[in-house]
Image (tube, grey):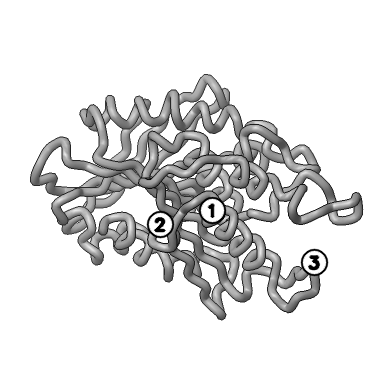
Amino acid sequence: MTDEKTTALTNIFVERKTLVSSFLERTVVIDAYLPVSVPEPGNMSLLLINDGQDLPKMPFDEMLDMLNVNMKNEPLLCIGIHCSNDRKMEYGIAQKKDYKGRGAKAGLYMRFVMEELLPFISYTYWIESFTKKSFAGFSLGGLSALDIVWNHPTEFSNVGVFSGSLWWRSKSYTDGYDDNRDRIMHRYIRKGKYYPHLKFFFECGGEDETEDRNNNGIIDSIDDTLDLIEELKALGYPDENIKYLELPDGKHDVATWARVFPEFLRWISS
């Protein structure tokens, strides 16, 4: 483990740490965004963020500092998890690879988060338990965050999915693909359970992509997100547990996600 102090702002302090994962067989870099002042020890929430290497591009530290999220009654510790060159294998759905074999290490990544990262955070920052835990991610990292939360509903309270790769499918479009049968996350949600405390935040941009496989005039990323929301509602999740933001000019990029992330931070801290 190594420590490297990187940034000190008015309300936020940022430091970089590394830990060696036996599951992933690599060194994982994380950036910890810490509140400078914690008025009540033990009254802390946690937010994990996939693709943490992209957060400085927002810039995330200044966003947190301006929002002053950490100075509320419930301070927030944010952990940006850097991805590896094996991103398309580590991110995905733990139980099933996609039709190209991607996501083969998603189960190992899930074990890293639950069995290595969370204990590491608690030990490093002397926090026995968090008031609530949230997980967020962008694109394929958003799918990964949703999958991990869905598989650990008693550990997490919120999930944020920004331009999520909810198209993740078991068949190619030219191999008898069917929306209802072959979108992997939708299928798992459909077979899941209702947990009253779980809340879901989704963002899509009107310019996320140009694909429209069913020719209905709506791009696939929006269709897939709206369909997944309907699956959640069918399980009993009410409108107040689901927030959906659609930016007509939103793109599949960090600049778009940076526009929406403050709303997500306010949402999980409310």
- How packed mark 2 is, by other alpha carbons closer than 10 Å (few <14, some 14-19, many 20 or more), is some
C-alpha gap between disc 1 and disc 2: 10 Å
Nearer the observer, 203 or 26: 203
C-alpha gap between disc 3 and disc 1: 23 Å
Residue drawn at (52%, 35%) of the image:
151
C-alpha gap between disc 2 and disc 3: 29 Å
Percent coordinates x, y for residue 3 in the rendering: 32, 33
Q: Are marks 3 and 1 in contact (CB under 8 Å)?
A: no
Percent coordinates x, y for residue 143 in the rendering: 58, 48
Say which of marks 3 and 1 sits in front. Answer: 1
Asked if residue 172 is positioned above or below residue 24 in the image, the reply reads below
Three-letter code, disc 3: Arg
Q: Quadrant of residue 241?
A: bottom left
Asked if residue 20 is positioned above or below residue 130 in the image, the reply reads above
Does residue 222 appear left or right of residue 99 in this picture? left
Please tell me the numbered disc located at residue 232: 1
Please tell me the numbered disc located at residue 224: none
Image quadrant for the N terminus? top left
Please tell me the numbered disc located at residue 241: 2
Under tag 3, what secondary structure?
loop
Image quadrant for the C terminus? bottom left
Q: Are marks 1 and 2 in contact (CB under 8 Å)?
A: yes
- How packed mark 3 is, by other alpha carbons closer than 10 Å (few <14, some 14-19, many 20 or more), is few
Q: Label 3 belongs to which residue?
A: 213
Q: Is residue 132 visible?
A: yes
Q: Is residue 58 visible?
A: no
Residue drawn at (42%, 70%) of the image:
259
Asked if residue 176 is positioned above or below residue 30 in the image, the reply reads below
Three-letter code, disc 1: Leu
Does residue 116 appear left or right of residue 111 in this picture? left
